[in-house]
Amino acid sequence: MKYLDDFSNIFKRYDLDLEVTGEAREVSKDATLQGIAKFVVDGDDEGILPAVQKALETKSPLDVINDALIAGMNEVSRLWDEGVYFLPQVILSADAMSVGIAECEKKMGKAMDRKSTVVTHTAEGDIHDIGQVIANALLNANGYEVVNLGADVPVEKVVAACKEHRPVMVTGTALMTTTMTAFPKIAHQLQAAGMNIPFICGGGAVCEEYVTSYDLGIWGKECSQAPGMAEDATAGESWEAMRAKWNG
Ligand code: B12
């Protein structure tokens, strides 16, 4: 019966074995930020919380988001591209990053007066919402009311939300070539309903050439652009003026 004494290997999840992190590159010279990035790379959603809380005692939430959480997730994307990481590791990393973002959002708090409303979504059929989550955090931090429709949102639901909330702009994120085609459909339906609002389209699947091929579309290269774009839209800039400013 001796061989039944140790059950540990029965419960071991080999698919979640993260021993590959030796291949991860350093993303920050700052030890605190590098430590947080490593929790993202390791997909450690428990360890990351105290590390982010400690960092927020001395660093701004935006620095932690940009230089540790996003930087760590970029490293995860690279490991995926190079075939080092597979879906289980990437899911764990995305979860860890989200825990960190939520803590930073808590620290940033909500401004008393919201400047204006922005509707955000991730394209129909697409669950890649990391870009949207980051954009939401930055918009919230900068005083905008975010109507977060989440991921895999049907075209009609995006249009209905715009009719209901009358945002100054709407954003979309698409990471797959199969899902980005929802964007021109949304743009056409918004125009048909008389809502000529800027439609910021981001995500790895889209490029400037694609997004500017339909009316309302403005290509969002970096999430960090979201607050500046919202500021322009709140000031009443047309989508054409915003396209000329942010694209091309
Ligand atoms: C993380 C990830 C996942 C995670 C997603 C977790 C989550 N909650 O998002 C999980 C593991 C769940 C996943 C699943 C799948 N994935 Co995946 N995934 C990735 C991966 C590794 C990274 C994507 C990412 O989050 N990058 C980081 C974020 C921050 O980048 P981003 O969204 O592009 O955002 C940047 C800009 O685009 C911009 N931006 C984005 N949104 C916005 C918004 C505004 C307002 C602004 C201003 C800017 C902006 O700002 C950001 C930079 O600052 C990529 C590979 C890669 N290297 O990109 C594959 C990738 C996107 N996945 C892919 C695939 C195929 C899948 C699956 C179908 C796999 C499968 N066989 O099941 C499923 C999808 C299921 C579905 N229906 O959606 C393919 C898509 C191929 C294609 N071109 O169609 C990719 C490209 C991998 C590949 N090379 O094959 N995936």
Image: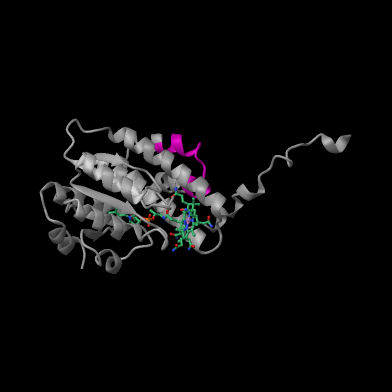
Q: Magenta stretch: dominant SS?
A: helix
**239 lies left or right of 153:** left
Residue 69 visible in the snapshot: yes
Question: Relative to 176, is 97 above or below?
Answer: above
- Where residue 40 sits in the image (x, y, percent)? 47, 47
Q: Is residue 46 magenta?
A: yes
Q: Which of the two residues, 59 or 172, is positioned nearer the viewer here?
A: 172
User: For residue 4, which quarter of the picture?
Assistant: top right
49 on left or right of 216: right
Which segment is the magenta one?
Answer: 39-52
Q: Hey, which residue is sitting farthest right in the picture? A: 1
> Which residue is drawn at the image coordinates 55% and 56% (left, top)?
85
Q: Residue 225: horizontal and vertical position, in percent?
A: 24, 54
Residue sitting farthest toward the top: 112
Please tell me in which quadrant of the rendered image residue 188 appears.
bottom left
Return the x and y of residue 57 as percentages of the image width and height: 34, 34
In the picture as drawn, the residue positioned furthest to the left comes out as 236
- Judging depth in this view, the residue of 63 and 31 nearest the camera is 63
Q: Position of residue 181 (x, y in %)?
A: 35, 61
Q: How is the image coloured?
A: one colour
**Magenta stretch contains residue 91:** no
* Quarter of the figure with the C terminus: bottom left
Judge by depth and name the residue closer to the eye, 8 or 51.
8
Q: Is residue 6 left or right of residue 98?
A: right
Quadrant for ligand 1 reads bottom left
